[in-house]
Image (cartoon, helix red, strand yellow):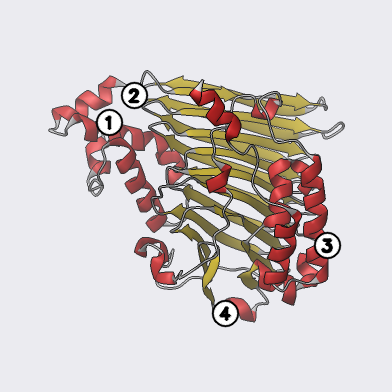
């Protein structure tokens, strides 16, 4: 009875009002068009019900234990500085320089760098609020109008009304950025942040970008309500990596969508390690003839973490190809859900879509669900899907133990081998090493020396 009364007394939705939306816009000194956009999104938000388990896309995920009284408190940046960001996240991704670096701490911009060679090519890499003021001709027609839209869901509408910070990357026609761009969103305080990523690649342009999401350990609950929009023009080539390692009291609700035009190419890598609960919608819209999209996802859940990834591959034009691979592991009492769909519109012939979910169950109390799906409205297509589940094989573990390696370390090495295919798709060696360290902590609680792993596993 006590527990039931406590749940009813908890706020059932984020504790914001239209006055908060207006105050945020005034504080940011935003242009009128952006203020009007926020208010319109808020009005839509108020009309929508909070997601419930009666909705198909939310049927397997219960977030009602979130304490919105804590998780709604907007972070104000306070005494944030670039030195708050962990050192391994401040280093250049490749070599000694990068195309640009933008860092936020507690939603506050603390670092902005753009390589002079990139700027000379007309590339714009700045925080989103600055972009809204200085480049409205580029932002206004693309911000939550083509990819993620306020009508996509309750949390999408909330984000459109209340986003607190973000990054804007624009690569003009024919420009190639050989150096990668790096974005860090790091929180040291408990509360709410609403970050946005907007990437626009014009025709025949090229870029690589990494976005890191992390937070220090917290006591109170926190929330991240985010959106990612990737607009890939004709014959453009985008490699985009998004890695998340929130603390264990953070709830993430995010909408992420890419649109790819004629002969464009998107290579999208997603990594999920942190958070108490994650609900992420990840969608690729192949809008142009010959468009290609590859989505690679990896996650590792432990303790009582809950990860729910909902992916969509939409073939909206003929001769398009999509390739999705999600690999995940779960241990202790954690749970994961992956639900995927490949969809083609009528008469979208000669498409090729593939999706696979590979799952490694590492304890008896962990649960992993993989639900692939096809919705095909054309008759000359090649679309396949698969979902597999397994445990660690004893033979390679026994071999490693026979070489004097303790069982926990042997299990880690085999688990890393399971993820290596996806780690190899990340084009930044330092980031791959950082992810291997995160896997170490999940399995054995400390980092290993990986220098001799390849030799040991070569049997």
Whether residue 17 sits left or right of residue 167 in the image: it is right
Q: Residue furthest right?
A: 347
Task: Tell which of 172 and 163 is nearer to you.
Answer: 163
Q: Nearer the viewer, mark 2 or mark 3?
A: 3
Task: Tell which of 281 and 174 is nearer to you.
Answer: 281
Residue 73 visible in image: yes
Answer above or below: position of 206 versus 223.
below
Residue under pointer 2: 392
Marked residue nearer the N-terminal end (4 or 3): 3
Whether residue 88 sits left or right of residue 382 in the image: it is left
Answer above or below: position of 249 versus 378.
below
Q: CA distance from mark 1 to mark 2?
A: 7 Å
Task: Tell which of 22 and 317 is nearer to you.
Answer: 22
Q: Nearer the viewer, mark 1 or mark 3?
A: 3
Asked where in the image residue 362 lies, by quadrant, the reply is top left
Marked residue nearer the N-terminal end (4 or 1): 4
Residue 202 visible in image: no
Would you say the residues marked 2 and 3 are in contact, meaning their CB atoms lie under 8 Å apart? no
């Amino acid at each position: 009875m006590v527990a039931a009364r406590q749940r009813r007394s908890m706020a059932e939705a984020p504790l914001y009002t239209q006055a908060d939306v207006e105050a945020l816009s005034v504080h940011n000194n935003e242009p009128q068009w952006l203020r009007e956009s926020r208010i319109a999104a808020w009005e839509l938000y108020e009309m929508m019900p909070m997601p419930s388990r009666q909705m198909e896309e939310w049927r397997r995920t219960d977030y009602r234990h979130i304490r919105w009284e804590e998780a709604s408190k907007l972070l104000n940046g306070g005494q944030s500085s670039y030195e708050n960001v962990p050192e391994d996240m401040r280093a250049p991704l490749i070599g000694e320089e990068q195309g640009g670096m933008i860092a936020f701490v507690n939603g506050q911009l603390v670092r902005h760098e753009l390589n002079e060679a990139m700027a000379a090519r007309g590339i714009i890499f700045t925080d989103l609020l600055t972009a809204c003021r200085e480049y409205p001709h580029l932002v206004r027609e693309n911000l939550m109008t083509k990819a993620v839209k306020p009508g996509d869901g309750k949390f999408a509408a909330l984000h459109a009304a209340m986003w607190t910070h973000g990054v804007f990357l624009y690569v003009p026609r024919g420009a190639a950025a050989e150096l990668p761009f790096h974005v860090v969103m790091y929180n040291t305080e408990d509360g709410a942040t609403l970050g946005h990523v907007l990437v626009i690649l014009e025709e025949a342009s090229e870029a690589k970008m990494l976005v890191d999401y992390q937070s220090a350990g917290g006591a109170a609950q926190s929330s991240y309500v985010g959106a990612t929009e990737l607009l890939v023009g004709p014959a453009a080539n985008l490699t985009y990596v998004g890695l998340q390692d929130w603390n264990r009291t953070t709830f993430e609700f995010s909408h992420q969508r890419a649109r790819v035009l004629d002969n464009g190419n998107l290579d999208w890598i997603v990594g999920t390690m942190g958070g108490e609960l994650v609900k992420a919608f990840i969608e690729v819209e192949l809008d142009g003839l010959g468009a290609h999209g590859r989505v690679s996802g990896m996650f590792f859940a432990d303790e009582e973490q809950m990860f729910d990834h909902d992916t969509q591959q939409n073939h909206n034009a003929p001769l398009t190809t999509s390739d999705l691979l999600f690999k995940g592991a779960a241990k202790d009492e954690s749970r994961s859900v992956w639900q995927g769909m490949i969809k083609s519109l009528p008469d979208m012939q000669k498409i090729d879509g593939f999706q696979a979910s590979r799952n490694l169950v590492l304890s008896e109390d962990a649960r992993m669900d993989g639900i692939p799906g096809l919705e095909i409205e054309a008759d000359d297509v090649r679309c396949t899907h698969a979902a597999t589940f397994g445990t660690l094989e004893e033979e390679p573990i026994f071999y490693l133990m026979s070489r004097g390696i303790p069982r926990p370390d042997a299990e880690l090495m085999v688990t890393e081998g399971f993820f290596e295919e996806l780690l190899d798709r990340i084009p930044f060696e330092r980031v791959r090493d950082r992810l291997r360290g995160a896997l170490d902590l999940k399995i054995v609680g400390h980092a290993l020396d990986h220098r001799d792993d390849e030799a040991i596993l070569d049997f």
